[in-house]
Amino acid sequence: MVSALTSLVQRRWSGLHQAAFLLAISSLASQVLALLRDRLLASTFGAGRTLDLYYAAFRVPDLVYVTIASFVSVTILIPILTRLVNKKEESAKLLSEVSTLFVCVMIVVSGFLWMFMPTLAHLIAPGFVQEDTATLVLLSRLMLLSPLLLGLSNIVGSVTQVYRRFFLYALAPIFYNLGIILGILFLYPLFGVSGLAMGVVIGAISHVLVQLPALSAERIRLSWRFPRGRSWEKIRTIITISIPRTITLAAHQLALAGLFALASFLGAGAIAIFNLAWNLQSVPLSLFGVSYSVAAFPTLSRLAAKGERDNFILYIRNTTRHLIFWSLPTAALVIVLRAHLVRVIYGAGEFDWVATRLTAAALALFVISLVAQNIVLLFVRGYYAVGKTRTPLIVNSLSSLGIIAVAPLLLSLFRSSPSFARFVEHLLRVDSLTGTELLMIPLAFSIGLIVNLCVLWVLFERSQGPLLRPIVKSVFQSFLSALLIGVTTYYALSAYVGFFNVHTASGLFGQGLFAGVTGILAGVSLLILMDNEELRDMVMSARQKIARRRLVLPDPEEL
């Protein structure tokens, strides 16, 4: 057992398919643990103030992570380390200088934030009472250790990827979630709410430690070393490349912070419901948007570098239609099965039926922009491939500001217009529930992302070439299939209700599973009748061997 584990740790995964399979298993395990983590949180605390405090405490550390730790992202470091793959001493020198500079900056920034956290806490959650704000300050201060640790893990992770020690890289997110689960199960009973933050820190420590054997295996020794002389040129290059991406990520985090601040005025549980729905909608976003955009990026970069503009726009166009092909039916299924998904995943302990219905409604509002979210990720990569980082930076930043501006306007409309409020509540089946005004926050997010997509789409067509016209047929077929899947699943739920005890989690799961499969079969049948190109491509790809290509991994912040 020990020798087998040692072999896995020391092994270099040179085969594409072996490495891809390993990472797929790791990603699935990490997703399962993340859902288990959220289920434990929801069942232990319910949609109440404790969970609000826990999620709100992530805002400042997450902002620090994407603004500072993203400068040492694997996306930036891997190309540089690849050129030094046979020069271990130079690699160690560069990593030591980057690590030293990063740690120094993080210590200064974290110290500054630690002192001003009481002020920042009022900005993060201005609707909290004084006692809750004090707890938020404590949790946020404890969690300030996580961006430092995860940033160091990024640096070590670049080594695990360059030298193909994928087993260690695959373990990191699993150990991170295990640390958080440890905090929920064991540290919270001992230390109260502070134990939750301790679990996050333990998870971040584990994220780093599990990858350290890669350094010793490659005989790369990190030391305390400040950049000197020509080393600053490489540091400046790293910073220059990172700036547009960092600002874009920071704008996204600021938008979330603004929505959290607004939710803090909407009563206990509003932030928790928002975050739980957000985490669920992030699953299909990772499966489709992140996967396709990351996989397409190397090819897009190569085509752009060779000046093959027609092939570049063709590749974007084909990837776009496949994203729509997957995203529209998924959105339809999630909207129809939203209550089943939320109840099966979160519905235990203190997470009651009211919280289930509100979370399900918020999930539906997030998912209406799933297509937009997925395609925006692709367009951003496309702009990066052609070297135009300014456009997505400006559009995404303005979109983030727009989301923050639209949310209070929708909230005001919801409160001042009873007819609008009744329409929304009836449409989402949350009539007679209190706290439905919080649904305006995910609605504002989706509106902002849809507008973001429209602007990026128009600008992309002007600069690169036509996108929509050649894929109108595919989009129309995907829409009809999604519509049929949604309608069929909706009526199948009623047809199967007599076969399952819907008052139990297993009964709800069975009813939702059979209804969903029935809907999917109906949608696939329609696609076959329409001779859908995307379905033919999928079948053909399943029959043929996957062409050998370089393995590209998403960054931790993208996951």
Image: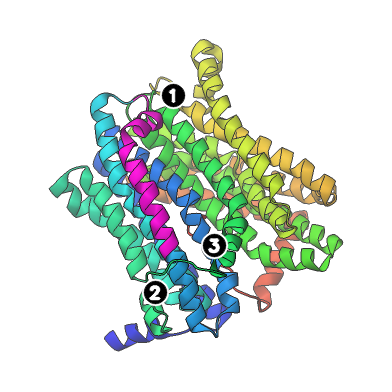
Is residue 291 toward the left or the right of residue 319 in the image? left
- Residue 125 painted magenta: yes
Tag 3 residue: 554
Is residue 35 toward the left or the right of residue 476 in the image? left
Residue type beneath disc 3: Pro
Tag 1 residue: 436
What secondary structure is marked by label 1? helix
* Between 527 and 196, the one nearer to me in the picture: 196
* Between 227 and 452, the one nearer to me in the picture: 227
**Residue range (magenta):** 100-127
Q: Is residue 29 above or below residue 125?
A: below
* Between 115 and 6, the one nearer to me in the picture: 115
- The answer for how far apart the CA atoms under marks 2 and 3 are is 25 Å
* Image x and y of residue 259, in percent: 47, 32
- The crowding category of the residue bearing disc 3, from other C-alpha atoms within 10 Å (few below 14, some 14 to 19, many at least 20), is some
- Residue 25 visible to an observer of this rendering: no
**Which residue is situated farthest in the left direction here?**
190
- The crowding category of the residue bearing disc 2, from other C-alpha atoms within 10 Å (few below 14, some 14 to 19, many at least 20), is some
Is residue 552 toward the left or the right of residue 527 in the image? left
Q: Earlier in the sequence, mark 3 or mark 1?
A: 1
> Number of labelled discs?
3
What secondary structure is marked by label 3? loop
* Image x and y of residue 429, in percent: 48, 27
Tag 2 residue: 222
Q: Earlier in the sequence, mark 2 or mark 1?
A: 2
